């Protein structure tokens, strides 16, 4: 007997898939609820913006202009979106930009970065149909732009039902995520069919989303917006404030450990203590990635036997001579790159995939990163091949401190090498600019006021939108 897949059967299957997804999402949230509550009480995570996460957004009145909803998950995506938001505001002045984030830190950065540029900044709704519908009804966007690859099935399905155009921008699909999605390929293909456009960073990203079922005509290539975001000048009074308060003059050698995770602070601190035995004038700035770890790092420094200071506390005389400075604030890290002699970009000795090297590169920093950089594999490879970044080999925790101490010591002693690495970093940045203009060009059919109706992009493909 042959079973024919009729439109009715396909519709029933689709409803079943989405219902199962919603059930699993709810079940997962219930299982994790005690953890969410604990983190909420301790650090304010998840509880912040809970009404908005349930779709109850602030009253915004009737918008005078059509809206574009840009979603950024956390800090990295929010910072990468800066040039895109500026370009949209400049080229499509008839549009109003609203921005959502998922994380508390992303929300804090968004309110700082897009202050005066976004009409509303809010938390993204939990991906239930009723919460999504409430949020979409309140925002009423013409189009939704999802930074990187935020695939929320109910959200995309509700956008389709409401005739709202949706595009992924700066799309990234890692090999790990690709393998996971392949287990539910039919469902993911149906979810992706709600997209009008996916502007991917690389050919590999484009080929992966193509293999998951997105139509070729809906796929474009842009390069990475983070190159453009990293190249944007950061004029911040915080730089001069920090320089004066902590006496970080050009004659002072400063190691900046940026966006660190456990056990990287211990590794860096152990290496630094060996360096201080040879040169007591060298100073260290620790900038942990997650605010909830600030107190743990403070306790670590208390037991290290070194003088240290906290950025968040009132200024004291110790600040000017402290061996270690704990940057326990949000959003101030970019202000320190120009003051650092060496920048270590964390999350890379720890197996968390690494963090963005582009911001320090834009300042011409001398950059070291660890082996585990799979979140930014293409970017790191580009810089390593250009001699613009030093990357550590894969090391055990026991061996990491001695290798880090060796690299730091060599670079501290060789000003010419540091200068050359900084020049190559800036040059590599300049050679990879342009993702913003390519992205906006591909978004024009969705954003232009003369093309307000929902329609496939049609002219965008892997072949027709090559990287410049």
Image (cartoon, rainbow, N blue to C red):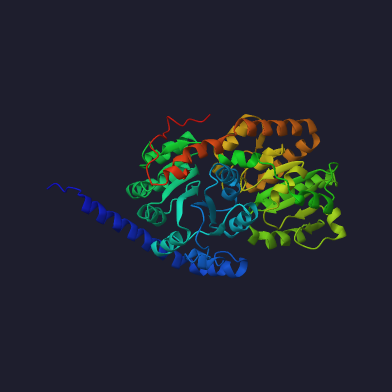
Closest to the observer, 62 or 240: 62
Farthest right residue in view: 317
Instruction: Name which quarter of the figure residue 328 lies in.
Output: bottom right
- 359 vs 373, left or right, is right
Residue for point 20% across, 48% down:
5
Instruction: Name which quarter of the figure residue 463 lies in.
Output: top left
Closest to the observer, 324 or 454: 454
Farthest left residue in view: 1
Above or below: residue 437 compared with residue 144? above
Above or below: residue 258 compared with residue 23? above
Tell me where residue 33 appears, x and y as whole percent. 49, 68
Residue 259 in sight from this viewpoint: yes
Above or below: residue 34 compared with residue 2? below
Residue for point 62% across, 66% down:
43
Residue 171 in sight from this viewpoint: no
Tell me where residue 90 appears, x and y as whole percent. 58, 43
Residue for point 54% across, 54% down:
99
Tell me where residue 331 appears, x and y as whole percent. 67, 53
Tell me where residue 447 appears, x and y as whole percent. 47, 44
- 330 vs 209, left or right, is right
């Amino acid at each position: 007997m042959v079973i024919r897949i009729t439109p009715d059967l396909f519709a029933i299957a689709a409803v079943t898939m989405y219902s199962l997804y919603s059930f699993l999402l709810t079940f997962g949230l219930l299982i994790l609820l005690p953890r969410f509550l604990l983190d909420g009480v301790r650090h304010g995570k998840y509880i912040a913006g809970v009404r908005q996460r349930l779709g109850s957004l602030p009253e915004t009145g009737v918008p005078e202009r059509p809206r574009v909803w840009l979603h950024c998950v956390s800090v990295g995506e929010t910072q990468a979106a800066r040039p895109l938001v500026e370009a949209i505001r400049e080229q499509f002045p008839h549009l109003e930009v609203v921005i959502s984030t998922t994380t508390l830190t992303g929300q804090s950065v968004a309110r700082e970065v897009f202050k005066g540029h976004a009409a509303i900044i809010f938390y993204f709704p939990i991906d239930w149909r009723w919460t999504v519908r409430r949020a979409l009804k309140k925002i009423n966007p013409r189009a939704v732009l999802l930074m990187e690859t935020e695939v929320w099935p109910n959200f995309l399905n509700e956008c389709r039902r409401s005739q709202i155009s949706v595009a992924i921008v700066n799309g990234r699909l890692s090999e790990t995520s690709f393998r996971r999605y392949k287990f539910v390929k039919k469902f993911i293909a149906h979810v992706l069919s709600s997209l009008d456009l996916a502007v991917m960073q690389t050919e590999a990203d484009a080929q992966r989303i193509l293999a998951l079922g997105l139509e070729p005509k809906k796929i474009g290539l842009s390069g990475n917006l983070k190159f453009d975001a990293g190249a944007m000048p950061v004029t911040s009074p915080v730089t001069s404030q920090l320089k004066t308060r902590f006496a970080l003059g050009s004659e002072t050698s400063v190691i900046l450990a940026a966006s660190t995770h456990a056990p990287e602070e211990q590794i860096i601190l152990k290496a630094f203590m060996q360096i201080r035995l040879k040169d007591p004038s060298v100073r260290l700035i620790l900038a942990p990635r997650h605010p909830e770890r600030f107190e743990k790092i403070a306790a670590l420094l208390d037991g290290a036997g070194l003088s240290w200071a906290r950025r968040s506390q009132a200024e004291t005389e110790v600040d000017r001579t402290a061996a270690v400075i704990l940057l326990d604030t949000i959003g101030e890290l970019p202000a320190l790159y120009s003051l650092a002699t060496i920048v270590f970009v964390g999350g890379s000795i720890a197996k968390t995939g690494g963090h963005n090297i582009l911001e320090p590169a834009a300042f011409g920093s001398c950059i070291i990163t660890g082996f585990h950089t799979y979140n930014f594999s293409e970017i790191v490879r580009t810089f390593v091949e250009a001699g613009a970044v030093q990357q550590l080999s894969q090391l055990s925790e026991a061996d990491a401190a001695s290798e880090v101490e060796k690299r730091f010591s060599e670079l501290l002693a060789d000003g010419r090498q540091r200068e050359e690495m900084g020049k190559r970093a800036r040059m590599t940045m300049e050679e990879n600019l342009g993702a913003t203009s390519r992205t906006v060009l591909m978004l024009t059919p969705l954003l232009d006021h003369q093309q307000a109706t929902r329609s496939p992009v049609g002219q965008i493909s892997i072949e027709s939108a090559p990287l410049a």
